[in-house]
Amino acid sequence: MFKRLDHINEPTVTITIEDRQIKVPAGDSVAAAMLAAGIVTARMTPISSAHRGPYCMMGTCFECLVEIDGVPTQLACQTQVREGMNVTIQRGLRDLAT
Amino acid sequence: MKRQYDLIIIGAGPAGMAAAIEAGKSGVSAMVLGDQWSPGGQVYRAIERVRPEKLATLGADYRYGQHLARQFREAYAEYLPGAAVWQVEPDLIVNFIIEEKAGQIKAKRILIATGARERPVPIPGWTLPGVMAATAADVLLKSHGIVPCGRIVLAGSGPLLFLTAARLVDFGVMVNAVLDTTPFANYISALPALPKALLAHEYLLMGLRMKQRIHRSGIPVYRNVKNIEAEGSNAVETVRFSSNGKTRKLKVDTLLLHNGVVPDTQITQQLDCEHIWYDMQRYWQPLVDKWGNTSDSGIAVAGDAAGIAGAKAAEVSGHLAALEAVYRLKVISRQERDLRAAPLEKRLLREKAVRPFLDRLFRPDPGLLVPSDDRTIVCRCEEVTAGEIRKALELGALGPNQLKSQTRCGMGPCQARMCGLTVSEIIAEYRNEDVSKVGYPRIRPPIKPISVDQLADLELVD
């Protein structure tokens, strides 16, 4: 569980995470936005469908792999939010046909 | 952006920034590639963006980064934030990816200043959402003003464990417990190094003050902690451990683990530079001379990526490495290099004076580094457990690379960043061999994700 220390009083963008529309600071990483929105799961593993979430927040552990705007296996902690971005939890193996 | 630079610096933390500042003074063309969106590295993360109210609470050591970042911006060096390096070629070509486009630039000299990363220490259940590295909390706090709430437990050892706890307390976060795994024996073995550490006594004072803050806030600190296990179904719910021999269980929403930091050697390993094993802190570091020169001609390392010594030491080593680069580029003479280096070398000795003490005090318990529970996941990416690794060793896997072929351990997206050290330790224990003989999995490019599309569109520089 995570929370923001202060009210957001900087430029924001509206993004969708798992069908939920939320307003987040434009400087947020996708991973930060997810955690602040109460979502600790980023993906379900291809091998056992185990739930995984951000671990290192600095682009080292490669756990926070999510699907952004239809493109799978994006590192949420190294991707900055954009207006209208659509983020979904990556469930299992990426779809090679995309 | 040019096609070639005199000096390419990889990393925009204290070492990278200092090197850019120093190189700029001599008029060489320098380019700094930072993979984050603004300078500062990890220790001064978000230093340009952080709100003034937070600055005071984050302390003077962090605030110092503003001064460094300002000098960096004013330096005669180019800076490309958001550039992730995916390969460095021995003929000094640096391949990177920025805004989903692959790029390539050439250098006469390369300085690797990629800093440190967390030492990953597997425990049962460490892959559950809600279990995170303590530095992740630091990132969330500095870059985004986000803090954990609910039940929070910190576990492990090392100065950053207590610093993170103290920081959370400073920002009004209720920490429920700190589980300290530092073995009591370490306090005794660290004593001989204490006199030297007093030369850099401000580090010791800082440590004492941190512990005081935690003590005064009433957070229970459990000592001699062993056998930590995280439990839960789709997220962490409880943490089990023993403290001074007594078994305990705590409810938890966020479990922050920390067991020291280790050099980020991904690039030097990819280049096949010579590395040496630093037994006191159980990590690999590139073999470098006092200027940071590696076994590869034209390639040097500065800062924590060459061996953990902290932010101030990193800054000084960045200056030294840049002086060496400028000398090798024949812009200054050997005498001038040595003259300018002399006060820096003195300063470096002083900053490093505390290391022998800290390295002994926070020496990782070897028992901790080799998961005894077979169920413990070692390779998080490919979900390979300690038991599966030991079975592969029984079946004759000779080393980390054979183990990789047999179990897929190290083949996942993180490319052994999270399992490499543990694999070396498990093999060493199994074969009763020194880790330095066991080696490390071979690291191949690309070391950051890149698609075939992006590769195909890459404009070659030669």
Image (cartoon, rainbow, N blue to C red):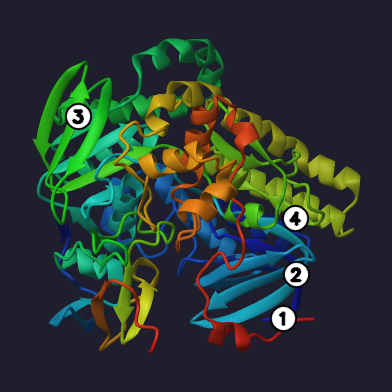
The tag earlier along the polypeptide, 2 or 1, is 1
User: How many angstroms separate mark 3 from mark 4 (CA)?
Assistant: 45 Å
User: How many angstroms separate mark 2 from mark 1 (CA)?
Assistant: 10 Å
Residue B299 is labelled as 4
The tag earlier along the polypeptide, 4 or 1, is 1
Does the residue at mark 2 contact the one at mark 1 (Cβ under 8 Å)?
yes
Query: In the image, is residue B371 above or below residue B4?
Result: above
User: How many angstroms separate mark 4 from mark 1 (CA)?
Assistant: 20 Å
Specify the subunit that label 1 lies on. Answer: B
Residue B241 is labelled as 3
Residue B2 is labelled as 1
Does the residue at mark 4 contact the one at mark 1 (Cβ under 8 Å)?
no
The tag earlier along the polypeptide, 3 or 4, is 3
Q: Are marks 4 and 1 on the same chain?
A: yes
Q: Are marks 2 and 1 on the same chain?
A: yes
Q: Amino acid at mark 4?
A: Ile
The tag earlier along the polypeptide, 3 or 2, is 2
The answer to whether residue B370 of the structure is visible from this angle is yes
Which of discs 3 and 2 lies nearer the camera? The answer is 3
User: How many angstroms separate mark 1 from mark 3 (CA)?
Assistant: 55 Å
Q: Quadrant of residue B452?
A: bottom right
Disc 4 is placed on an element classified as strand
Specify the subunit that label 3 lies on. Answer: B
Disc 2: CA contacts within 10 A as few (<14), some (14-19) or many (>=20):
some
Left or right of B200, for residue A68: left
Q: Identify the residue at image location x=22%, y=32%.
A: B178
